[in-house]
Image (spheres, helix red, strand yellow):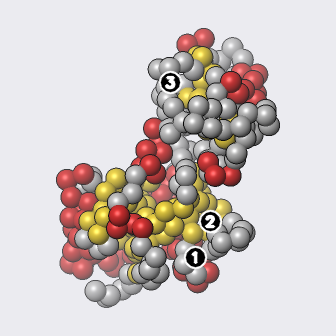
Amino acid sequence: MVDKLVNSEANARRIQMVESCFGSSGQPLQVPGRVLVGEGVLTKMCRKKPKARQFFLFNDILVYGNILIQKKKYTKQHIIPLEEVKLRPMEDEGALKNGWLICTASKSFAVYAATDTEKQEWMAHISKCIEDLIKKSGKKPAAEHAAVWVPDSAASICMHCKKTQFTTFNRRHHCRKCGSVVCGPCSNRKFLLPSQSNKPLRVCNACYNTLSRQRAGDLPSSSTAEVGDEGEGSSGEEDSDDEWDSPAQKYNQRPQVPTFYRDGEI
């Protein structure tokens, strides 16, 4: 299916349309051999709450961004190489249904479809693209994936010490290793996590101790450091896209049904 669309005019037009929707803020997406397999709106679990995001599935990458005007303008483009992705299904929990995890070495998060049918379609198409890509490249799937961050709303007290109550002054922080929501004193150190960053990242005390034992003697002392005022705050650099939404994203309409392209479809 995908091979027949590689050099088609329809595929070129679709990719050009995606590029134009992101404008100058996005990266060029038109490269030889790339095919737009499908697109649609999914609800992404962000740090503070679930939010609608536009997703585009290509045969080699997964792209998503914030919605300013549906089908016309998107911002904050994120590109994820599919060879790094592992999918994990999730059980329905309360109002959050039809979800699964998108896991990569640098970042992992949950997304939710409007229906179970759409969930199965998304997961099947993504899985097929990953399988075909790895088969062609001969590369092995990533063995290690970043932890999924626990949403702020799921923790009113520190998940480590079970004592500190979060307030305006007692800010929430996330451990970059396990994803737990912890207070400042319980996450006052950093550790180098090469799969996520070339700089030491904030980790909770438990993960710091475990990582230190595992890598004893393997890392220079500069790989770890106390977290001071110069360190990242509770927002986290990798979650900056989740702190802002345009008024257009606060709609209550049902997201449009996703589109998956097949041979000859325009």
- Evaluate if marks 2 and 1 touch, with contact meaning CB atoms under 8 Å apart: yes
* Residue 45 - label: none
Looking at the rendered image, the disc whose residue lies closer to the viewer, 2 or 3, is: 3
Q: CA distance from mark 2 to mark 3?
A: 32 Å
Q: Depth check: 14 or 253 in front?
A: 253
**Which residue does the numbered mark 1 point to in the structure image?**
119
Query: Which of pointers 2 and 3 lies earlier in the amino acid sequence?
Result: 2
**Which residue does the numbered mark 2 point to in the structure image?**
100
Decide: few, some or many residues near mark 2? Use Cα within 10 Å; few <14, some 14-19, many ≥20: many
Give the residue type at disc 2. Trp
Decide: few, some or many residues near mark 3? Use Cα within 10 Å; few <14, some 14-19, many ≥20: some
**Which residue does the numbered mark 3 point to in the structure image?**
231
**Residue at the image position 71 percent from the left and 70 percent from the top:** 94
**Residue at the image position 31 percent from the left and 64 percent from the top:** 68
Give the residue type at disc 1. Lys
Q: Position of residue 231 (x, y in %)?
A: 50, 24
Query: Which of pointers 1 and 3 lies earlier in the amino acid sequence?
Result: 1
Observer able to see residue 151: yes
Observer able to see residue 57: no
From the viewer's perspective, is residue 62 above or below residue 261? Answer: above
Outermost residue to the right: 162
Give the residue type at disc 3. Gly
- The answer to whether residue 77 is left or right of residue 53 is left
Q: Quadrant of the C terminus?
A: bottom left
Q: Position of residue 55 (x, y in %)?
A: 42, 66
Decide: few, some or many residues near mark 1? Use Cα within 10 Å; few <14, some 14-19, many ≥20: some
Based on the displayed image, in which of its 4 quarters is residue 247 positioned? bottom left
**Residue at the image position 25 percent from the left and 71 percent from the top:** 72
